Image (spheres, helix red, strand yellow):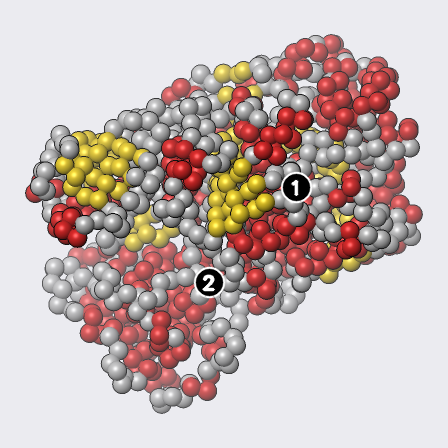
Amino acid sequence: MDGEELTAQETALYDRQIRVWGVDAQKRLSKAQILVSGLNGTSVEFCKNIVLAGVGSLTLMDDRLVTEDALQANFLIPRDETVYSGRSLSELCCESLRDFNPMVRVLAEKGDLAQCEIDFLDKFDVVVVTGCSLKTKIEINEKCRKRAKRIAFYAIECRDSCGEIFVDLQNYTYAQKKSDGTAECHLSYPRLEDAILIPWRNLPRKVSKLYFAMRVIEKFELSEGRNPGELSNFDLPAVLKLRKELCDAQSLNESHVPETLLERILVAGPMLYPPVCPILGGILGQEVIKAISGKGDPLKNFFYFDAADGKGVIEDISNPSSI
Amino acid sequence: MGSDSKEEAIKRAKVLMVGAGGIGCELLKTLALSGFQDVHIIDMDTIEVSNLNRQFLFRQSHVGQSKAKVARDAVLKFMPQINITPYHANVKDPGFNVDFFKQFNVVLNGLDNLDARRHVNRLCLAAEVPLIESGTTGFLGQQVTVHIKGRTECYECQPKPTPKTYPVCTITSTPSKFVHCIVWAKDLLFAKLFGDKNQENDLFVSAGDGSDSVKPTDIFERGSDEDLEQYGRKIYDHVFGYNIEVALANEETWKSRRRPNPIFLKDVLPERLILQNGNLEKNFLTEDLPLSAMTSVGLSNPQDVWSLADNSRIFLEALRLFFGRREKEIGNLTFDKDDQLAVEFVTSAANIRASSFGISLHSLFDAKGIAGNIVHAVATTNAIIAGLIVIEAIKVLQADFQNCRMTYCLEHPARKMLLMPVEPFEANKSCYVCSETPLLLEVNTRTSTLRDFVDKIVKNKLGMSFPLIMQGATLIFEVGDDLEEDVAANYALNLDKVLVELPAPVTSGTMLTVEDLQQELSCHINVKHREEFDEDKEPDKMVLLGWTAPEKKSQVVSNGNSTSAAVSAATETTMKSEEAKVNAEISGTKRKLSEILEATENQEASQILSGPDADSFKNPQELEDGDDDLVVLDNYPETSKKQRLRQV
């Protein structure tokens, strides 16, 4: 790759990872601009990984003030009220992240990504959203799609001990490693809105139950005007009713969306099972590094993890005709 | 399992973490966030710059400080109420004995070397504390495993790749790969020039006729008033020129090999000879920068492959800087991958030697990786591994053993999975560590000494630190600090005796008992006399059998450990790239990805699949259970065909 060499400081700091992905990938990383909207246990794990990896810049958006819920699974905020009171999550996390790697510019941006000017997105190569409604995710995904340059879009949500990652790399071409050199590989991703519109009966066989559970919960939250995690056990009857409606409409047996799974998610409400955060944040970090560096097969287009069975599964939900 | 009992189990738990490095930092953070209250952490290392890209609890300003202590302070900032007890110490210290381990409910390893892992495994077995391990399997990526005495395999039930060693003559006379040149430069030349002078060293080229006419010691010794530049030239011409000429004299060696070219300084850097003494002095660096020969000769990019001339300049400059600026350390230096000047010296020496032998040259970056056995590491993998370790630890603490899983973190998805859980393996009944099965040692009892046995088998193969060896009821050897003087003298005498001449002779049919009191490990070894060994394949001249599965291809002697001269070069991680494939083929008991996949394949086939027709959706029960299917693998390939599926 063209461009200036890495500095001696960079070479020393990034020695171990350059051995994994090479100098060119490291140079590409150092030019990448990342935006994260929504700060929670999972996204701060991602932020840590990407700052350590040495991206060009990381911009954080989350104007919420610190609450008990916001503190959980967040190792970026000192448990000291005199430090955090009156300051936003993005400001506080920004401060800690800067410390992790002085070579990365970490910025806090005020405002709501869903409301911001559309050309604001042009500054970024990667946009990660979490902690917002399905509607907001779809809107931001759309905005990324409308820009002239390709902006990689990721949505991540953790609920209790389960998590979901959605990836939209639009049209993505990369050099796939083969035993005999590399071959150009082309992937075409659907938008979030289109992916979740695919009729359930047309989905690939044995799709993770989490896929259906997440759609039911998300729809419930949307209809109630709530944010992810603003749930409790009391919502169970209403959620089960919605499950029945959705399953009937899609001719899917309700057993694909087990009540025990829905109940587990509702009971947890805003609480996350902390060890799940580094797993989801780690997978997302890997994927973003792959997308920026062009090294490695990127996942397409959903990823699921559930601590209950320990499986981390990729689901390709993109082609309506796939069987 | 209610979440209350989970919280209770976490709160009550006393956890020991071994290692505060890449996985350790992630682990400590995740334990703290998960609500753990009492964590002890052992790490002997101090922080280095190259740690900072992933060991996120550390900052530039912490370089040189104890990892365990700095990690504790960093976690207390966001989790002030947690109790963390740091130990800046080696886990092999005698203080960390079985009683120490017994106070913990679970032990979590974040280690980077086989030796310490084996040690911790034994202490956990002896103390009956569950152990959660993580590590690379080479070709599969990483895995997290759970080891509970009486329920699962122990860490050593499956043979582990041990450091790769090379036959002495490959290193000293007939290198064919760059790694051979690195081993020569690091373990022979560097050690000879800068290390302990009393250490045995094979740095001479045997003429092959057994005459050791060249006494190299005199040449390497620098006269008290010998000019540095002259001394450097003399060393250069001796090791790269004269020694190669001597080797070339032995025609037999080169019949089927490419002949090396002797390299003399006058041919590479003719202008160097004109330079008068002291002309380079002006290049000395300022005090606050680390000494670097690269910098003083004006090279900056560690990714570049230098020419022979540049390598020669760096070689001479590094030598000069060592003697001129770090004279106090000479005699005590061991190679350290974080010592810039040492890496420069070894890189240049290996490259010059590679030029001689027609082997392609490498950059400093690559040479450092090979010489330092550097672990390739990124933050994301460590974070994922740490999350998985904590999930398993919590299950162990809740005594929810049947749900414990071993998880593979795959680089490429297999059956859609990036994280693939499988049921833990059962203990290997012939494991010498967790079962009492005796081992078999084939050895020439008339030529091998007790010292050979202690070094090659007891320490290297069995991984014991404080061994005690008995022949029947007679104690023939023991390591300890508190031995009586006459006893110690007696043991020292025994060390140099061949086995048949020991006070209690060891002959074919003798059973030895070897114990390590710290590890509380005892094993029996049946001795079988054997006259001949293949020098290339069995450089130890003794073979230990019985600690791997019975089908015998897995006895790979090239994986054996050092003889006094065979030089240990690679670790577990270097194995990954080059040796992994070999290992996969030779090691019968390795769990192969293909087997696992086969099992998963069956699993899928066994299920009622939801096809495009809605009918199949009407089979709720089977789908429900099907999703929770678990792949159960047997330990050994001969039985793996019987892989069965279990409905949980």
Query: Residue A125 at what x, y percent from top left?
Result: 76, 52
- For the C terminus of chain B, the quadrant is top right
At label 1, which amino acid type do we have?
Leu
Residue B98 shows in the view: yes
Give the numbered dot on residue B338.
2
C-beta proximity under 8 Å, tags 1 and 2: no
At horizontal 58% and vertical 51% (from top left) the residue drawn is: B72
Query: Residue B548 at what x, y percent from top left?
Result: 32, 31
Read off the residue under disc 1: B33
Q: Nearer the viewer, residue B133 or A103?
A: B133
At horizontal 76% and vertical 26% (from top left) the residue drawn is: A267
Q: Residues within 10 Å of mark 1 (few under 14, many from 20)?
A: many
Q: CA distance from mark 1 to mark 2?
A: 33 Å
Marks 1 & 2 on one chain: yes
Q: In the image, A68: left or right of B88?
A: right
Residue A23 shows in the view: no
Q: In terms of sequence position, does the residue under pointer 1 or pointer 2 come before the other?
A: 1
Label 1: which secondary element: helix
At horizontal 14% and vertical 51% (from top left) the residue drawn is: B486
